[in-house]
């Protein structure tokens, strides 16, 4: 019933605004013109006239434009907001042109207008433009959410992000900070000699990560294709081709998985590769990038997140997965020699896993159940099992493990890195093991990419590879509790 009343009220407001729209047109006003010659933004004026004393007037003529967020005294005072801030407009019949005076009663909250006039500061200290000429730039037919409560429905905030951005400076700043974070990341990598590249979004074989893909169809080729789950295998092809010894890509990945505060089916990642180094070099790059971005964007490597203070200054601890599980639970998985014993140990720790889970899957499940959530400060978790790491080199000291680490902050994985396999015969065996897992029912196991194995047979230099989840990094650096807060248009279930 409440929804019906709200809709009826909105319909009434819209009808009233349509009447005003008709009246504007009757005055000869185009309420949706092609442009407006703006000479200044709100932040420019506030900076330029910061020393203008209260009560002072200038003859400086400016033209400003923005959205009406407040109207007082029948339009005499208007708070005009642009993307940089607020400026007050003073509309008085002694200053405002006759067409402007006629338009004033036809303005509403949410309308976008342009105003030209002179700058002054009121006796109360408010920087103001004395309106001379007024132009309607976009008549809003629907009302904005109520000013003091804004968008209280979290679902509406994400579905109608444009309304959220109109009403919330916090939301605008989060997405602006995201842009700065990505820009700084890109610049830092280029300064380190990395070459930015682009690789395909449509793959004929999904690979590069253990994930279920989205499937689409190319009509002209009558071919099923997959939205990429990771750019890894194509970036390695570029490394094989000698395009550069340092490569990176910042772009989207698509995984047909559930939605949670830390997961969105469409997400952005950084993935980079450097020849002639191993995964320890990737630890240093991850620490450098994340710390330097925080310092430049936030002014500090110590950041607040939730109830915690997190220190991002390098170096970060490096501990093995099995070591952390033993430290937390007393169970030493490295001493368990077969799959059955590992499964029993993991189940006794409360971990969930399949009846045929391998030793490595059991260790990973125990880590997820008992350790992961407690990793608040940055840490590189090393020693990932071989059977869950099909693209990483075998550890030099234990063939059950690989030279792979994941970086955890606030209990989340924010980075993943390997010493990359460059032995084509080893890689083929890993793919074959993944195919066996697929046949046993694992939908996320990686299929064989025969062309990638062929490429490896021409020789790939030893290399380290690193992936950083940009959405999660932005969550940390904006103190945002949900991934939906940092993605402009998150994936949502349709209404109704």
Image: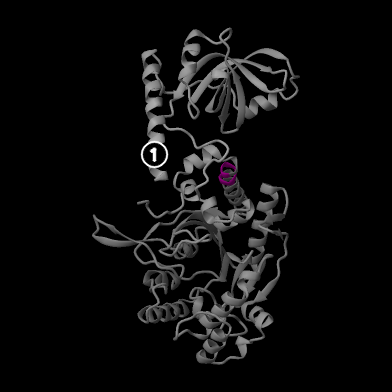
Q: Is residue 394 visible?
A: no
**Position of residue 126 measured from the top left corner of the image (x, y, whole percent):** 68, 23
Q: Is residue 294 left or right of residue 406?
A: right
* Secondary structure category for the residue under label 1: helix
Which residues are drawn in magenta?
171-175
Name the chief secondary structure element in magenta. helix
Count of marks placed on residues:
1
Mark 1 — residue?
7
Question: Above or below — where is 196 with respect to 402?
Answer: above
Q: Is residue 425 visible?
A: yes
Res. 172 image quadrant? top right
Q: Is residue 210 left or right of residue 96?
A: left
Question: Above or below — where is 256 with respect to 55?
Answer: below
Residue for point 72% across, 62% down: 314
Q: Quadrant of the N terminus?
A: top left
The magenta stretch spans residue 467: no
Question: Above or below — where is 147 with respect to 240?
Answer: above
**Position of residue 424 measured from the top left corner of the image (x, y, whole percent):** 45, 76
Q: Is residue 441 left or right of residue 408?
A: left
Res. 106 image quadrant? top left
């Amino acid at each position: 019933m409440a929804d019906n009343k709200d809709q009826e009220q909105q319909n009434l407001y819209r009808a009233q605004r349509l009447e005003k729209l008709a009246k504007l047109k009757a005055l000869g006003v185009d309420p949706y013109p092609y442009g407006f010659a703006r000479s200044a933004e709100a932040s420019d004026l506030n900076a330029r006239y910061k020393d203008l004393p209260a009560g002072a007037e200038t003859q400086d003529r400016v033209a400003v434009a923005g959205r009406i967020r407040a109207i007082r005294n029948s339009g005499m005072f208007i708070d005009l907001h642009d993307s940089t801030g607020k400026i007050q407009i003073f509309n008085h019949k002694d200053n405002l042109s006759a067409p402007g005076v006629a338009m004033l009663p036809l303005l509403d909250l949410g309308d976008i207008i342009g105003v030209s006039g002179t700058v002054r500061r009121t006796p109360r200290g408010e920087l103001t433009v004395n309106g001379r000429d007024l132009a309607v730039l976009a008549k809003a037919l629907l009302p904005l959410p109520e000013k003091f409560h804004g968008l209280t429905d979290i679902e509406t905030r994400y579905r109608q992000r444009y309304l959220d951005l109109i009403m919330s400076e916090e939301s605008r700043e989060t997405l602006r900070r995201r842009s700065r974070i990505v820009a700084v990341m890109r610049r830092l990598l280029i300064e380190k000699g990395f070459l930015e590249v682009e690789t395909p979004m449509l793959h004929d074989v999904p690979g590069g990560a253990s994930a279920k893909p989205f499937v689409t169809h190319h009509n002209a080729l009558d071919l099923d294709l997959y939205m990429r789950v990771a750019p890894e295998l194509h970036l390695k092809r570029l490394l094989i081709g000698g395009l550069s010894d340092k490569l990176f890509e910042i772009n989207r990945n698509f995984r047909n998985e559930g939605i949670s505060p830390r997961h969105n089916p469409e997400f952005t990642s950084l993935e980079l590769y450097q020849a002639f180094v191993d995964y320890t070099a990737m630890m240093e790059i991850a620490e450098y990038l994340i710390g330097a971005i925080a310092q430049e964007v936030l002014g500090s490597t110590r950041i607040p997140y939730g109830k915690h203070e997190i220190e991002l200054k390098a170096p970060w601890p490096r501990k093995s997965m099995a070591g952390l599980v033993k430290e937390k639970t007393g169970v030493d998985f490295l001493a368990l020699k077969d799959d059955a014993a590992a499964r029993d140990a993991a189940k006794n720790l409360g971990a969930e896993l399949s009846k045929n889970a391998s030793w490595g899957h059991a260790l990973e499940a125990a880590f997820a159940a008992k350790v992961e959530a407690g990793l608040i400060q940055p840490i590189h978790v090393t020693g990932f099992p071989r059977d869950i790491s099909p693209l990483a080199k075998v550890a030099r000291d234990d063939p059950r493990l690989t030279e792979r680490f994941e970086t955890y902050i606030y209990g989340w994985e924010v980075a993943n890195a390997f010493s990359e396999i460059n032995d084509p015969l080893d890689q083929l065996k890993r793919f074959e093991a993944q195919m066996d897992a697929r046949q046993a029912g694992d939908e996320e196991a990686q299929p064989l990419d025969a062309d990638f194995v062929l490429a490896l047979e021409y020789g790939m230099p030893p290399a380290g590879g690193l992936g950083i989840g940009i959405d999660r990094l932005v969550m940390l650096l904006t103190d945002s509790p949900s991934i939906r807060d940092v993605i402009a248009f998150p994936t949502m279930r349709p209404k109704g």
